[in-house]
Structure formats: C-alpha cells, structure tokens
Image (cartoon, helix red, strand yellow):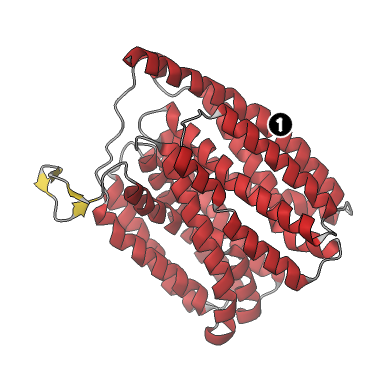
C-alpha cells in the first residue's frame, strides 16, 4: 500500500492500495460482492429458509426473487446517482444499511414480512453494487478488475454453498444472515484503504464524447441474454441431473466441484486482460459455452454432466468479466458500468421465471437446452459487434500514441 497524499484537501489517515493494483481490485471486489453476496449463496438461503423456518419452496423462492428484483431497482437508482454523489460515503452508508437489515432479518419468521424486508435489502445492495461497478469502471483496466470480482464471487460463493447448509441445522436460519453480516463488516473495514477513483477524464480521438449509445445497447442486450440463459439453466440444474437419472449426492458433488473449477474463467481474465483484445477471446469462449450446453443433453452420463457444469461455469465467469468491462468503456463517469449491473440482475431474475414456465407447460429439459443454444448463438453475435469496435478503437488510440 502507498499513502495517498490528500483526500478532498485533507491528509489521508489510512494508507491506500495502489489504484490499479490487484490488491485494489480485491478490495473493490469485496465491496461489490457485499451488495449481492446472497445471490452467490442463494441455494443455501432458500434451503435454509425451508428447513430452518419451515417455509414452503414457493415462499423461500419468492423471498430470494424479491432480493434480486430489489437489487435491480437499486442498480437502476445507481445509474442516476453515480455522477452526483461521493462514492465512498454512499458505500459506507449502504453497507451499514445492509448490516442493519440483516440483523433485523434474524428475528423475522413470517414469510410475508420477510419478503418486504429482503426487497428493501436488495434495493440497498443493488445501489452498492451499482456504485462499486461505477468505481471499477474508473480503473485503468476494468476488464481485469471485473475478473477479480467474479473470481472472488465464485470462490466465496462456493465456500458459502458448501458450509452454510451444514450450519443451518445446528444454528438455525440465523446462520445465513450472520454470514451476510460478517461479510458486510469485512467489506466495511476495507473501504478506507481504497483510493479516490475520481471520474476518468474524457478520452480523445475515437472514444471522445458522450455515451456511445449503439455499442452500449448491443453490450447490454448481450449481458441480458447471457445472464438470463445461464441462470435459467443454473436454477434447474439439480432437477436436470436427477431427471436424466443421476443420484442427488452425485449432482451436489458435481455442482460443488464445478463452482471451484469455474474460478479458472475470471482467473484467465485477470492474467490476460485485454492483451488479445476482446473479440477473439469472446468468440472462442462462447464456442466453449455452446459445446458445454450441448453436452447437457448427455447428462445421463456422469462424466458428461460434470464436464458440462465445469465448462459452462468457466465460460460464464470469463464472458461476464469481459462484458461488464466493455459496458464500462462507453462513458467516463461509470454510468454505463452501473447500467450493465442493472441489466445483469434483470437477466438473472428473468431466466428462472421463463424456464419455470416452460417446465410447467409440460415441455422437457430438451426444449430448455435447445432454446439456450439458440439464445447463446444470438448473444454471441450481438456481443461480438461492440467487442470488435472497442478493439478497433484501442488500436487507433495505440497508433496515436506511437
């Protein structure tokens, strides 16, 4: 860490991590993850509410959905506020708010009350994520920082899914909210060690001007489709395995292993960043996504199910790191990065709803998998358009500096 000379004209009391270092990326990742950590441990939360509070599957699912839809609303608010507020005080206030609501949630046993409390929790959490994404957009290499973010989320999410279900029978559902409180407290302790991250200066040449609406639209649409399709599969991935004849214990083991293997995806983004541009990495990785999704058709084979989960997990983290990094490139203040976070949450909330309707209508998993393959192809075509444009602009800027 290096001391920052001043903050708003006053000496800093804390040493700060170098603005664009890996350490700073980790600190920012904890800040962003704190607002949405419950999504990473959603399976544990839903199971804990059912087994610990005696709620029905539908009630527990609705509480989880309320949290996510609230987060989408909070992210939308962040798009409006990111240019007008000081991010550090806003982040601290949001973290304190999350802690207070999680403490309150410990004492609530009524599902109809808890759903509104968690909705409000989601709004504050979404606002924090939107602010964090806006700050990440101000770093020198947002793609790499988003890679760090997803690495942290996958790693801690896997740990939470492994440990929390074992704690609920012993300590009750309160263990879930205590875990969220501890994570928020840890994130709160990290905030003072972050640098200032003022809005990036306006860029010259091909990237100058206001928000680039057309490539941004393509990027946001790609984020929505990619997240919706992935979450539609993930929400029912246990049922898919069991339907194809796999044992529940093996399915759980495969998913746990896949969560850790998936760390390779964002890890690769951390290592290579945009060294090879964005077009070709996305083109190749989306090819692997299609292959992994097609492999789910053979889920009756244990190896096929495991490989498909590991492969799609790796590509999920890698593609989202690039897409969120791309979204951050279309203005200097961080608004478009916050917009990427908003659209991502809408996609995550929409996918399971659509997949559930397909299954309820009597169609099988073959229909869901084939629909996923088609939408992944569409998403690939859409995301490659702004990726190629950003690669060209980067080459123009590089040529201008030589």
| Farthest residue, direction right | 362
**Going 32% across and 49% down the picture, which residue do you hit?**
24
Mark 1 closeness class: few <14, some 14–19, many ≥20 residues within 10 Å: some
- State left or right for residue 120 relative to residue 60: left
Relative placement, left or right, of 370 versus 170 is right
- The quadrant the C terminus occupies is top left
Q: Nearer the viewer, residue 163 or 8?
A: 163
Residue shown at the point (14%, 51%) measured from the top left = 12
Image height check: is 51 above or below 359?
below
Image location (x, y in percent) of residue 330 = 44, 27
Q: State the image coordinates of residue 365 (x, y, percent, origin top left).
A: 84, 52
Residue 116 visible in rendering: no
In the image, 65 versus 177, the foreground residue is 177
172 horizontally vs 82: left or right: right
On screen, residue 38 above or below 227? below
Q: Residue at x 37, y 50 (%)?
A: 28
The percent position of residue 165, horizontal first and vertical second, equals 59, 76
Q: Position of residue 48 (x, y in %)?
A: 60, 75
For disc 1, the marked residue is 378
Give the vertical position of 201 relative to 38 (above or below): above
Q: Report the front residue among 239 and 71.
A: 239
Q: Name the residue located 58 percent from the left edge and 71 percent from the top edge.
A: 162
Is residue 111 something that shows in the picture?
yes
Q: Secondary structure at mark 1?
A: helix
């Amino acid at each position: 860490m290096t001391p920052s000379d001043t903050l708003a004209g006053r000496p800093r009391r804390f040493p700060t991590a170098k603005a664009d270092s890996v350490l700073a990326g980790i600190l920012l990742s904890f800040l962003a993850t704190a607002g949405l950590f419950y999504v990473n441990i959603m399976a544990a939360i839903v199971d804990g509410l059912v087994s610990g509070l005696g709620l029905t599957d539908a009630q527990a699912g609705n509480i989880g959905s309320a949290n996510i839809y609230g987060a989408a609303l909070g992210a939308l608010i962040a798009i409006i506020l990111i240019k007008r507020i000081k991010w550090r005080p806003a982040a601290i206030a949001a973290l304190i708010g999350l802690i207070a609501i999680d403490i309150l949630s410990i004492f609530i046993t009524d599902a109809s009350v808890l759903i509104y409390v968690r909705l409000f929790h989601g709004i504050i959490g979404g606002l924090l994520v939107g602010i964090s994404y806006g700050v990440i957009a101000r770093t020198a290499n947002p793609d790499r920082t988003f890679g760090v973010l997803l690495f942290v989320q996958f790693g801690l999410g896997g740990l939470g899914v492994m440990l929390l279900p074992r704690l609920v029978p012993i300590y009750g559902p309160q263990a879930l909210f205590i875990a969220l409180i501890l994570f928020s407290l840890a994130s709160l302790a990290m905030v003072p060690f972050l640098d200032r991250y003022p809005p990036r200066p306006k860029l010259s040449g091909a990237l100058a001007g206001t928000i680039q609406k057309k490539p941004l639209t393509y990027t946001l649409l790609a984020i929505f489709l990619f997240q919706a399709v992935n979450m539609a599969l993930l929400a029912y991935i246990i049922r898919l395995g069991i339907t194809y004849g796999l044992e529940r214990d093996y399915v759980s083991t495969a998913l746990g292993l896949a969560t850790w293997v998936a760390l390779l995806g964002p890890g690769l983004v951390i290592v290579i960043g945009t060294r090879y541009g964005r077009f070709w990495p996305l083109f190749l990785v989306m090819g692997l996504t299609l292959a992994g999704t097609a492999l789910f058709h053979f889920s009756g084979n244990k190896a096929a199910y495991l490989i498909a989960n590991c492969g799609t997990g790796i590509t999920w983290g890698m593609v989202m790191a690039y897409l969120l990094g791309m979204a951050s490139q279309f203005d200097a203040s961080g608004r478009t990065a916050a917009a990427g976070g908003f659209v991502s949450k809408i996609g995550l909330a929409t996918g399971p709803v659509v997949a559930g309707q397909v299954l309820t209508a009597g169609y099988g998993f073959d229909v869901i998998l084939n629909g996923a393959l088609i939408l992944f192809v569409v998403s690939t075509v859409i995301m490659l358009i702004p990726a190629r444009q950003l690669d060209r602009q980067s080459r123009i800027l590089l040529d201008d500096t030589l």
